[in-house]
Image: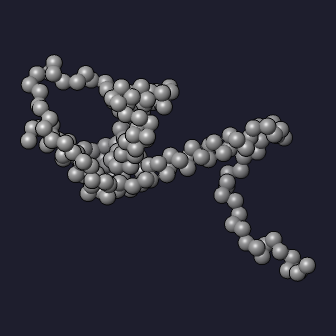
Amino acid sequence: MEALDLILNLSMQPTQEAGGPKIPMKYGRVDVSAPAECPEEGRLPAAGPPKPADHLREVFYRMGLNDREIVALSGAHTLGRSRPERSGWGKPETKYTKNGPGAPGGQSWTAKWLKFDNSYFKEAFFKDYAEAHAKLSNLGPKFDPQEGIVLDDVAGEKFTAANYSSGKVD
């Protein structure tokens, strides 16, 4: 087994151990013997580009991946930590990551950063949905005052039928 096959195999094991899928692997990669034989640097997405979707497509389309595969691979953010110097997001460290495990520092993308699940998408979807819904609901109507009124507690009151019933049966 060549070194690259070993490294790729070892990178797949934590995904499976964290509850992720078994990843099919093809062996037989040939190790390089000189830097000139390596792929060029900078093939991964940049941190915080002005048009993120266009940038991801530019990067991954040239590797032969489609939109569905780009979204699926983005789900890997459910594991591990972000590093602001690389991603443009997060804290340099938290009280949990200051001394490890693994490489110290960074901030997790999700609350359960050692579990492979859909929480990265759920959190991103909820945030995007809330912003899109608010934008849609603000299209068209006039506001008084013009900037509208924003309440701090957007959760609202829990509906209880007794609060809205007179007790009389019609």
Quadrant of image for the N terminus: top left
Residue 106 drawn at (x, y percent): 34, 42
**Is residue 108 visible to the viewer in this orientation of the structure?**
no
Front-most of residues 20 and 42: 20
* Quadrant of the drawing holding the C terminus: bottom right
Q: How many marks?
A: 0
Residue under the image location 67 percent in, 51 percent down = 152
Could one spot residue 28 in this view of the protein? yes
Residue 90 x %, y %: 42, 40
Q: Position of residue 28 (x, y in %)?
A: 13, 38
Query: Relative to 23, does residue 90 appear above or below in the rendering?
Result: above
Q: How is the image coloured?
A: one colour
Q: Residue at x 37, y 42 (%)?
A: 73
Residue at left 76%, top 45%? Answer: 149
Quadrant in the picture for residue 84: top left
| Viewer-nearest residue: 114 or 139 | 139
Q: Is residue 117 above or below residue 163?
A: above
In-image side of 143 versus 127 (left or right):
right
The front one of 4 and 161 is 4
**Rendered residue at 48%/30% (across/down):** 52
User: Residue pushed farthest top?
Assistant: 36
Q: x%, y% of residue 105?
A: 31, 43
Give the side of residue 5 with respect to residue 115, left or right: left
Is residue 78 toward the left or the right of residue 104 in the image? right
